[in-house]
Every structure is written in C-alpha cells, then in structure tokens.
Image (cartoon, rainbow, N blue to C red):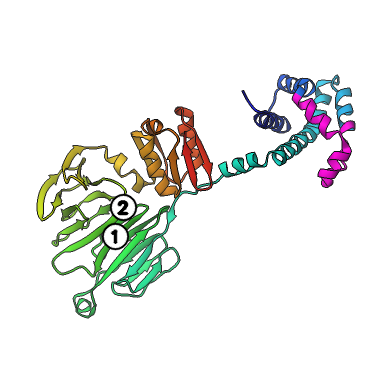
C-alpha cells in the first residue's frame, strides 16, 4: 500500500503534466474530480486554509488566500471546457504549491525519514581520467593537472594520456635508469604510450611499474595490481608483463591482464597475436601458449591454471567504455561498479548476491541509471546511505 509521500509525489506529477498541457480533456476532468473528492487532498487543504498557521510557519507565503482559491475553484467546475482549461492551469500552480508545503510539514514532523530520503539521493559520479606518476620514489606528479613533465624519458601529458619518447643511443648513455610507477585510484582510469610505442590502458584501482628507458635486451613491466589492456608494438626485444603469480611473454600482440589484489585469480585474455602465459609456483615455471579468444587463469592460493575460450568483447568492454555483464552474479557486478563509482556495498541477504544478470551499459552513465535497470528486471532493490549501498 502506498504511503502519503508516494501519493503526494504521484499527484504532483499529474499536476505537472496538467500544467505542461500533456493531459487530455478527459484526464483533466478526472484530475479535477480527484482534487474535489479525494479525502487526503481535502485534508491538506483544510490544514493550509488556516491562514494564521500558514503565516507563522511560512511567512514568505502569507499572501496566499487558500479559502478564496478553493471557493473560486469550486464555483468554476461547471464552466465550459475551454474556460475550465485556462482556470485549471492557474489553480494547478496553487495546488502544486500546497502539495510542496504539505511535504515540508510532513518532513519537518518526521525528520529522520527526511534524512534517509536525502541520503538515498546521493549521486555517485562515474570515473574520470586520474592517475599519479611516481619517479624513483623521489618525485610525484598528479597527471590530471601536471603537463610536460621534464625527466628521463621526455614525457608529454595531456590529462588523459602520458606518453614517452624513445631515447637515442647517445641519450641512453647519459640517462640514469629509473623506475616509473603509474597508479589510478578507485574511480580513475588512464592511458600510456611507452617509449617503444606500446599502448597501455589502465582500469580503475590499478598500478603498473616499469624501467625508463627499457633495457637493451628486454621490455618489462610489473603489474602490481589492477587491470590493464596492452597493445604491444612489434620489436625484436621481448615484452614481459609480470605479477606475483604469473608472467606473460610477447613480441607484438594485444591482450588483457587482470591481477586485482582482492580477487583470487590472475588472468590473461589474448585478443590477437600469440602470448606465452607463465605460471609461477615457488621457483617452478609452467608455460602455456594462448590463442586469440582464450583466457588463462592462475589461482593465487592453489597455483592451479585453467584455460578456456571466452567472449573477448565482454572481457575488454571496460577499455571501450562499457560495462558488459553476461550471466554474472549481482555480487560480482556490485564489485565492478564499486571500483568505478567508488562506493562501498553490502547485502542484506547473501542469497541475492548469487542472482545472475546480463546487461551492457556505458561506463559513464550515472550509477543510479544502472541500478534502476537492475531494479526493473530483477526482484532487487538498493538503499543508499552516504557512501554505502545496501542490496536487498
């Protein structure tokens, strides 16, 4: 059963449609009858027709003569359709104000309810281009604000892309090798172009480290955490991507590498070309060759490796600006969303977390839009309080 707040919101919406001229003559007549006959509306009118009470609480509105408006309204119900329409537009504005004022009284009487409603309107913005560059743990740059960084490697930064220029042989002799670390926060992403022309996309909550310039025999990067998409430029020197439990060796190819700290698996998905996926267990190495369209995963705890065919578009959707969930549990979906929109979440009933869902939506939509899609297709609801979203 709907509460008074829901009824007032629905009624106000009808009045808005009336004022906008979007109701038919039949709908207008029905609404006018509702105003005249609905006991709750009459109650609102009776309360606010008391001018003294209204003046004390809302001094700015003391010129409103509610008695006069109601009498005028009642006496004109039998006018012609055209006259009624013109009059309705005037009266609707007054009634809309009454509904607003009644809502104010309602919220002032039930303050804790109002606070909950305001909390539910918290807006979680989608992620943006944000990253931090640390050079040899000596210098730190906020890439969203700093441009044209002068250090080894000759860097250019435009707030979205950090690019390196390859050093000449003579310059290599003068340059002191340094470690560069780029990290994105929750709700951030960034792009890099390394000195060899390799293109790198960093997802939210990701950290990558590499030597500048690369050595003369190998190109190697360390993924400390997160998710990264690589388009490796062809080069005689092998390109190595390393993490705690896995390593990928390529010459020129495109692949996705995922190694989040709060997930139990490290994975590589090959998009094109060929890679060697190397699992590391103590000092033992196991090498697996991947073909395009396949993913290799290694467990952080058991070191077991699994290889299987996957939907590439689903895996790399984040890099193209999409969320693509196909038969994915609500628990995993909330995990992905929380990293991008930077919020915390919990489940009122853990059984809900196992429900599966399929959806493809832009990563730059407002979070509420995505949650509404889930609401409409599943028996799931969300309650927001500050930065915590409860799934129920």
Establish if 358 lies above or below 187: above
Which residue is painted at 31% across and 52% down in the image?
226
* x and y, in percent, of residue 283 in the image: 10, 56
Q: Main secondary structure of the magenta part?
A: helix
Identify which residue, 100 or 352, lies in the foreground. 352
* x and y, in percent, of residue 351 in the image: 38, 30
Magenta includes 58? yes
Which residue is painted at 86% across and 23% down in the image?
74
Kindly identify which numbered label has been placed on residue 226: 2
Highlighted magenta segment, given as a residue range? 40-67
Q: From the viewer's perspective, is 165 left or right of 298?
A: right
Which residue is painted at 30% across and 50% down in the image?
260
Mark 1 Cα-neighbour bin, 10 Å: few <14, some 14–19, many ≥20: many
Instruction: Examine the image and state in which quarter residue 295 appears.
Output: top left
Q: In what quadrant of the picture does the N terminus appear?
A: top right
Instruction: Examine the image and state in which quarter residue 97 appears.
Output: top right
Task: Say if residue 234 shows up in the picture.
Answer: no
For disc 1, the marked residue is: 208
Kindly identify which numbered label has been placed on residue 192: none
How far apart are the two marked residues, 1 and 2, measured between alpha carbons?
Answer: 8 Å
Asked which secondary structure carries label 1, the reply is: strand
Identify which residue, 258 or 77, lies in the foreground. 258
Establish if 335 lies above or below 210: above
Magenta includes 265? no
Asked which secondary structure carries label 2, the reply is: strand
Q: From the viewer's perspective, is 201 left or right of 282?
A: right
How many marks do you count on the picture? 2
* x and y, in percent, of residue 310 in the image: 24, 37
Mark 2 Cα-neighbour bin, 10 Å: few <14, some 14–19, many ≥20: many
Mark 1 touches mark 2? (CB < 8 Å): yes
Instruction: State the residue lying farthest toward the bottom.
Output: 174
Which residue is painted at 43% across and 40% down in the image?
346
């Amino acid at each position: 059963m709907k509460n008074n707040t829901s009824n007032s919101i629905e009624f106000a919406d009808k009045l808005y449609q009336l004022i906008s001229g979007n109701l038919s003559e039949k709908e207008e007549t029905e609404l006018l009858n509702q105003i005249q006959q609905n006991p709750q509306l009459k109650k609102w009118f009776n309360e606010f027709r008391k001018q003294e009470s209204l003046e004390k609480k809302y001094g700015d509105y003391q010129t409103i003569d509610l008695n006069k408006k109601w009498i005028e309204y009642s006496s004109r119900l039998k006018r012609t359709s055209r006259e009624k329409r013109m009059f309705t537009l005037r009266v609707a504005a007054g009634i809309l104000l009454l509904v607003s004022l009644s809502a104010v009284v309602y919220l002032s009487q039930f303050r804790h309810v109002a606070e909950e409603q305001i909390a539910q309107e918290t807006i979680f913005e989608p992620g943006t281009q944000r990253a931090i560059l640390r050079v040899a743990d000596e210098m730190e740059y906020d890439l969203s604000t700093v441009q044209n960084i002068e250090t080894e490697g000759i860097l250019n930064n435009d707030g979205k892309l950090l690019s390196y220029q390859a050093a000449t042989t003579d310059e290599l002799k003068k340059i002191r090798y340094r470690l560069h670390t780029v990290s994105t926060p929750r709700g951030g992403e960034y792009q890099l172009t390394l000195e060899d022309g390799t293109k790198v996309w960093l997802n939210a909550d990701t950290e990558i480290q590499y030597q500048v310039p690369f050595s003369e025999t190998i190109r190697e990067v360390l993924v400390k955490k997160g998710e990264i998409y690589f388009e490796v430029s062809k080069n005689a020197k092998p390109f190595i991507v390393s993490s705690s439990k896995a390593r990928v060796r390529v010459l020129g190819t495109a692949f996705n590498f995922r190694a989040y700290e709060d997930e139990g698996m490290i994975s590589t998905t090959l998009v094109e070309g060929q890679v060697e996926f190397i699992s590391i267990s103590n000092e033992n190495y196991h090498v697996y060759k991947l073909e395009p369209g396949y993913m290799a995963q290694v467990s952080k705890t058991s070191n077991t490796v699994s290889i299987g065919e996957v939907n590439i578009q689903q895996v790399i959707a984040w890099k193209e600006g999409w969320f693509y969930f196909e038969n994915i549990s609500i628990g995993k979906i909330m995990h992905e969303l929380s990293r991008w929109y930077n919020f915390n979440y919990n489940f009122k009933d853990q059984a809900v977390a196992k429900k599966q869902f399929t959806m493809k939506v832009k990563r730059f939509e407002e979070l509420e839009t995505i949650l509404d899609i889930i609401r409409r297709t599943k028996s799931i609801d969300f309650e927001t309080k500050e930065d915590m979203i409860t799934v129920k």
